[in-house]
Image (cartoon, rainbow, N blue to C red):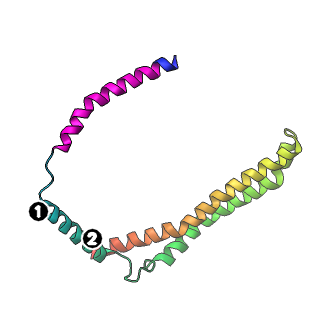
């Protein structure tokens, strides 16, 4: 049953490729773009890149954005209570999870499952905490860009 469906799909694909081949061959015959167009495009791209560097809210020596410490403190203050709650819950799972699972599972599994859960949860918590500086930097950059646009 599966092989027949695969053969049908293969035949359809082969027929589609045979129809597509002449169209692709016709694309090779198109003339290349004129050199003036290429030069103009390259010049416009260089100008845009130069303007982008001028508009960048970063400092010339590529330091962190101006409001980074304030944004990091703001994000850390907002993230601390839920992170502490998650940490407390994970500690409770490690301490009490084996007792709760002990009635249902053999002893090695009852001890391993809460620990495996806690290791995974701590990994997620580490990702959240590790992303705070990135989020703070991006927020600081966007604030600087908005401030420059409003001038």
Name the residue tied to disc 1: 36
Q: Is residue 115 or residue 80 the one in the foreground?
A: 115
Where does residue 44 sit, x and y in percent of width and height? 19, 67
Residue 100 showing in the rendered view:
no
Q: Which residues are magenta?
A: 5-29
Where does residue 87 sit, x and y in percent of width and height? 70, 60
Q: Is residue 137 or residue 17 the one in the foreground?
A: 17
Residue 151 magenta: no
- Within the image, what quadrant is residue 29 found in? top left
Q: Secondary structure at mark 2?
A: helix
Q: Tell me the chief SS of the magenta region.
A: helix
Q: Secondary structure at mark 1?
A: helix
Name the residue tied to disc 2: 49
Q: Could you tell whether 124 is left or right of 71 in the image? A: right
Q: Nearer the viewer, mark 1 or mark 2?
A: 1
Residue at the image point whose x is 28% and y is 77% from the top: 54
- Within the image, what quadrant is residue 50 found in? bottom left
Q: Is residue 139 or residue 30 the one in the foreground?
A: 30
Q: Could you tell whether 83 is left or right of 11 in the image? A: right
Quadrant in which the C terminus appears: bottom left
Mark 1 to mark 2 CA distance (whole Å): 20 Å
């Amino acid at each position: 049953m599966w092989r027949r469906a695969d053969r049908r799909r293969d035949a359809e694909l082969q027929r589609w490729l045979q129809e597509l081949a002449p169209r692709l061959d016709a694309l090779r015959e198109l003339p290349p773009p004129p050199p003036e167009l290429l030069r103009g495009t390259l010049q416009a791209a260089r100008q845009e890149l130069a303007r982008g560097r001028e508009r960048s809210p970063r400092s010339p020596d590529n330091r962190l954005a101006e409001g980074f410490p304030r944004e990091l403190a703001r994000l850390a203050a907002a993230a601390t209570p839920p992170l502490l709650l998650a940490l407390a819950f994970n500690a409770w799972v490690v301490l009490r999870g084996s007792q709760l699972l002990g009635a249902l599972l053999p002893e090695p599994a009852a001890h391993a499952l809460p620990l495996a859960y806690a290791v995974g949860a701590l990994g997620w918590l580490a990702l959240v905490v590790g992303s705070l500086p990135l989020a703070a930097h991006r927020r600081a950059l966007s604030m600087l860009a908005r401030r420059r646009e409003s001038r």
